[in-house]
Image (cartoon, rainbow, N blue to C red):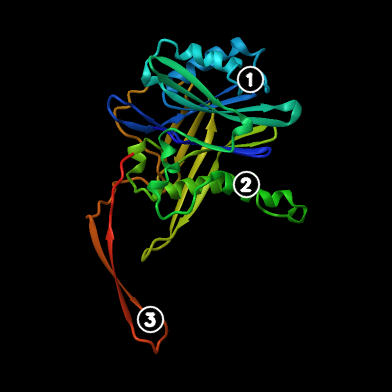
Amino acid sequence: MTFIAGVKYKNMGCVISDLRITKISTGKQQDIGLKYIGFDNRLMLYMSGQTVSLLTLIQEALPTVSNQLTAENVDQESGPLKTILSAVVEGKDKTYESSIIGVYVNEPSNSFKMFRVDLKYINGGWQIKFIADNNFEWEVIGSGEILMQKEFFPNWSPFSLYEIFRNGLQPLENPQYKDYKYCLKTVGEAIQDTIKQRLGALGKGIYKKLGISPVTSLSLISGSALIVIGGNYEITRYDTNEKPKIIKYSIQKELSNRVALTNQLTNETIKAYQTDSDFPHLEMSRNNSFDPEELEGEDILYPPYTLSQYFFQLAPQEPISIIRLITHTKYLFW
C-alpha cells in the first residue's frame, strides 16, 4: 500500500505522498494519514509500509542522535540514522518491511539532500540500504511502484518523473524567462497530474487495489526551505456529451499536525493526521475516501476480444473506407 514519490533537480525538489491508511485485518481503507514526520526543522521522513507503527518509534528515537545527525552523514549507511532504524526494527518480523524517502535541509549552505532507505527482512535478519543524495534523481516507494513497471503501460512513452520535473524547471534558469509564470509549485502540481493520469489509465479500481488515495499531498523543497502545500482547488472537468463539471475542494492545515480535507460542493470534511505519536486510535469500521474528483470506483471488465468500427475519408470526393479493429484485452496482476 501507499504511494510516495520524490524528485530532485539541482537545488529544487518535490515529494508526493498519498493519505490512505489500510487496516490489513479488515481491508477497510480511510484517507486519514499524513505519512511523514518532521524532526528539528531539518529532517522529513516519508514512509511506506508500517507507517503508523514505525514512524512513531523513529520520532521518539531521533532526539538521541540529534547532535550526531548532520547533512554529511544523514544519507550514509554508516550514519546515525541507520543506527536508529536498526534499533526500531530489531526483533520485528517481515511484515514490518518498509521504505523511506528522506529530505534533510541544511540552512547554512541553503541546500538539501534527498535520499531513499529500504528496510528489508532477508534470511531471518534486517538489511537497511540507502540510495544517497548523489545517486538520487527520482524514486517511488510503496505499492505505487507499479507506475515504474513498463509492462502495465505498453502504449506509453518511457516514463521519468525526473525528466518532467527538470524540463519544467529549466526555463526558470534562463534570464530571458525572468517574467515567466512557471514556478516550482506549478511544476510540482504537474508531477501530481502526471501521477493521477498514469494511475487513472489502470482503471478506477486501482486506488482500492493498491491502497492509494485519489488526492495526494505535495511537499516542495527549494534550497533549505521545505513546505507542505495546501489551499483551495477548483477544477473544471469536460466529459463527452455532458455539461462541464466544476469541482471544488480544499486542503487546510489545522492545529496538532492535522489537515482538513473538505469537499466544498458537499461540505463534507475528513480529518487527516500526521502518522506520529499523536496519531489517534481509530476503529476504521468503514471505508472513508476523500475523492472530490470521483476518480475512484469499480473497474470495467472487458471481454477478451472486442470489435470496433471506424469510418475514414481522406477528402469529400474520396470514397469512404471502413476500418474494423479487433482488440485483445490482457489483464496483468501486480
Disc 1 target residue? 40
Asked if 259 appears above or below 91 in the picture, the reply is: below
User: Could you classify mark 3 by the number of other residues whose Cα lies within 10 Å: few (under 14), some (14-19), or many (20 or more)?
Assistant: few
The label number, if any, that marks residue 20 in the structure image: none
Q: Would you say the residues marked 3 and 2 are in contact, meaning their CB atoms lie under 8 Å apart?
A: no
Determine the secondary structure under disc 2. Answer: helix
Q: In the rendering, at what x and y percent does residue 306 appear?
A: 24, 61
110 on left or right of 136? right
Going from the N terminus, do you reach mark 1 or mark 2 first?
Answer: 1
Disc 2 target residue? 166
Going from the N terminus, do you reach mark 1 or mark 3 first?
Answer: 1
Q: Where the N terminus falls, by quadrant? A: top left
Asked if 221 appears above or below 129 in the picture, the reply is: below
250 on left or right of 332? right
Determine the secondary structure under disc 1. Answer: loop
Asked if 77 appears above or below 156 in the picture, the reply is: above
**Residue type at tag 2:** Arg
User: Could you classify mark 2 by the number of other residues whose Cα lies within 10 Å: few (under 14), some (14-19), or many (20 or more)?
Assistant: some
Nearer mark to the viewer, of 1 and 3:
3
Q: Nearer the viewer, residue 17 or 116?
A: 116
Q: CA distance from mark 3 to mark 2?
A: 41 Å
Q: In the rendering, at what x and y percent does residue 47 appear?
A: 48, 27
Q: Is residue 177 visible?
A: yes
Going from the N terminus, do you reach mark 3 or mark 2 first?
Answer: 2
The label number, if any, that marks residue 313 in the structure image: 3
Q: Would you say the residues marked 1 and 3 are in contact, meaning their CB atoms lie under 8 Å apart?
A: no
Asked if 219 appears above or below 181 in the picture, the reply is: above
Determine the secondary structure under disc 3. Answer: loop
Q: Nearer the viewer, residue 2 or 293?
A: 2
Q: Nearer the viewer, residue 124 or 143?
A: 124
